[in-house]
Image: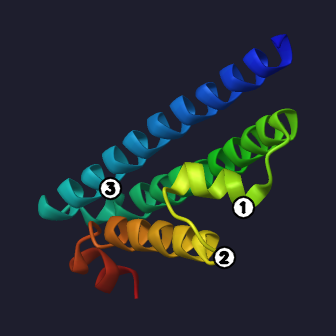
Amino acid sequence: MDDDRVALDELADRLHDERRIVAFLLYKLAVSRLLLAADERGFAPAALREVDRAMELLHEGVLRRDEAGRKLVGLWRVSPEEWLKTTDGQSGPNSSDEAVERRQATLHALSQAVPPSLVSFLR
């Protein structure tokens, strides 16, 4: 039972970390947008590097969260399909594909927060 508690605490910590990283990413996107609105294009490359680094941190956080989830699933002896049903709120054989699509849609929405002037500046 202690192993279950440790695994749950680990998963909760990873989820909390991921939430902080998403907030950090949104902050960096807002800073980038403000720099462009103020026509401070000299700072745009540095701001974009920070956005890229925040995206890397998010990716690393997702991997750590997935590993924590796999540990918990192993302790509970639950199949990965059952785990996806409970974490994604979906059922059926394509639930993981649907989860990936939802994550991609979220990332696409985040990318839309980058102003077009920044995109054209980088080209």
Instruction: Locate residue 10 relative to residue 95 in the image: left or right.
Output: right
Q: Which residue is mark 3?
A: 29
- Label 3 near label 2: C-beta < 8 Å? no
What sort of colour scheme is used for the picture?
A: rainbow
Q: Residue at x 52, y 56 (%)?
A: 88
Label tally: 3
Question: Looking at the image, which residue is at 63% across and 33% down?
Answer: 14
Identified at 34% across, 57% down, the residue is 43
Q: Residue furthest top?
A: 2
Give, as a three-letter code, the residue at label 2.
Pro
- Is 68 situated above or below 87? above
Sequence-wise, the earlier of marks 1 and 2 is 1
Q: Secondary structure at mark 2?
A: loop
Percent coordinates x, y for residue 69 in the rendering: 72, 42
Residue position marked by numbered label 2 in the rendering: 93
Which disc is residue 117 wearing? none
Q: Tag 3 or tag 2, which sits nearer the N-term?
A: 3
Mark 2 packing: few (<14 Cα in 10 Å), some, or many (20+)?
few
- Of tags 3 and 1, the one toward the viewer is 1
Which picture quadrant has residue 10? top right
At mark 1, the secondary structure is helix
Q: Is residue 22 above or below residue 84?
A: above
- Whether 12 is drawn above or below 58: the answer is above
Confirm or deny contact between disc 3 and disc 1 (CB under 8 A).
no
Would residue 97 appear left or right of 48 to someone viewing this image? right
In front of the other: 6 or 43 = 6
Q: Position of residue 42 (x, y in %)?
A: 32, 63
Marks 1,2: beta carbons within 8 A = yes
In this image, 59 relative to 23: left or right?
Answer: right
Q: Which residue is mark 1?
A: 81
